[in-house]
Image (spheres, rainbow, N blue to C red):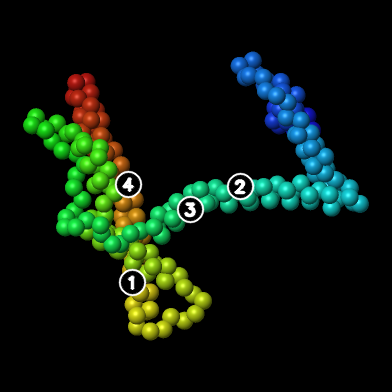
């Protein structure tokens, strides 16, 4: 109880009710008297020691689980919601009349310095969907649909078309996992090569110079 009061209740509950700043650097705040309502809810947790009223201890546990679940759902949507929306909102019809590749938004002047183009031109380029971007979006949409079709286990997939899409999703997943694994392995090799270069070139030469100088 002493540790609970000293480490938690005093700083996060009592000081907020009274409005007393926790440290000299903190500014005084108005008392949050609504926090008093948390006292009976918290005391219900100690009813677990009572055989007659131990059911009351489940109330704060249920409230904590409910608040935590709602917070996790909100955090999940904030993390994956934009990804889901960006996946769905993929235009596949180009708005450019003729150019296949998107023009660069920077250019070189006479001295070779990189300077950005006019902001109006850059905005127009970024708002235009060129044929290369439309093709990339088509490949993206096909990959997503094929990968999702691979995880359909509710019914037996029949028909050459559905089986072909299912196999395509499997291959896309294998390619994606292989690329991730390959990038991880190459990153590890980069670390090993850097350490071996240090041991062979710098540390080894330093040891050789020290041994040779000492001899």
Kindly identify which numbered label has been placed on residue 146: none
Q: Mark 2 points at which residue?
A: 71
Q: Is residue 212 above or below residue 186?
A: above
**Residue toward you, 145 or 2:** 145
Q: Which of marks 1 and 3 is nearer the N terminus?
A: 3
| Mark 2 vs 1: CB contact within 8 A | no
- Left/right placement of residue 173 relative to residue 134 reads right
Q: Does the rendering let one see residue 54? A: yes
- Left/right placement of residue 107 relative to residue 9 reads left
- Marks 3 and 4, how far apart at CA: 32 Å
Q: Position of residue 83 (x, y in %)?
A: 43, 53
- Marks 2 and 1, how far apart at CA: 37 Å
Q: Mark 1 points at which residue?
A: 168
Q: Earlier in the sequence, mark 3 or mark 4?
A: 3
Q: Mark 4 points at which residue?
A: 188
Crowdedness near tag 1: few (<14), some (14–19) or many (≥20) residues, C-alpha within 10 Å: some
Kindly identify which numbered label has been placed on residue 81: 3
| Mark 3 vs 4: CB contact within 8 A | no
Q: Which of marks 2 and 4 is nearer the N terminus?
A: 2
Image quarter where the C terminus lies is top left
Crowdedness near tag 4: few (<14), some (14–19) or many (≥20) residues, C-alpha within 10 Å: few
Crowdedness near tag 3: few (<14), some (14–19) or many (≥20) residues, C-alpha within 10 Å: few
Name the residue located 29 percent from the left edge and 38 percent from the top edge.
195
- Marks 1 and 3, how far apart at CA: 26 Å
Nearest to viewer (mark 3 / mark 4): 3
Q: Is mark 2 on a helix, strand or loop?
A: helix
Q: Is mark 3 on a helix, strand or loop?
A: helix
Name the residue located 75 percent from the left edge and 24 percent from the top edge.
18
| Mark 2 vs 4: CB contact within 8 A | no
């Amino acid at each position: 109880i002493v540790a609970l009061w000293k480490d938690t209740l005093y700083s996060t509950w009592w000081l907020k009710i009274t409005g007393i700043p926790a440290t000299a650097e903190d500014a005084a705040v108005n008392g949050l008297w609504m926090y008093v309502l948390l006292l009976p809810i918290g005391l219900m947790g100690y009813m677990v020691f009572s055989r007659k009223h131990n059911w009351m201890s489940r109330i704060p546990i249920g409230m904590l689980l409910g608040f935590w679940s709602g917070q996790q759902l909100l955090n999940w949507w904030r993390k994956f919601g934009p990804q889901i929306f960006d996946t769905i909102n993929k235009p596949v019809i180009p708005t450019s009349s003729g150019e296949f590749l998107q023009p660069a938004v920077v250019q070189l002047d006479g001295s070779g310095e990189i300077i950005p183009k006019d902001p109006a031109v850059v905005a127009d380029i970024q708002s235009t969907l060129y044929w290369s971007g439309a093709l990339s979006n088509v490949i993206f949409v096909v990959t997503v649909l094929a990968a999702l079709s691979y995880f359909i286990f509710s019914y037996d997939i029949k028909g050459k078309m559905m089986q072909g899409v299912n196999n395509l999703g499997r291959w896309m997943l294998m390619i994606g996992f292989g690329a991730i694994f390959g990038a991880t392995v190459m990153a590890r090799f980069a670390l090993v090569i850097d350490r071996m270069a240090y041991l062979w070139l710098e540390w080894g030469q330093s040891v050789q110079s020290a041994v040779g100088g000492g001899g």
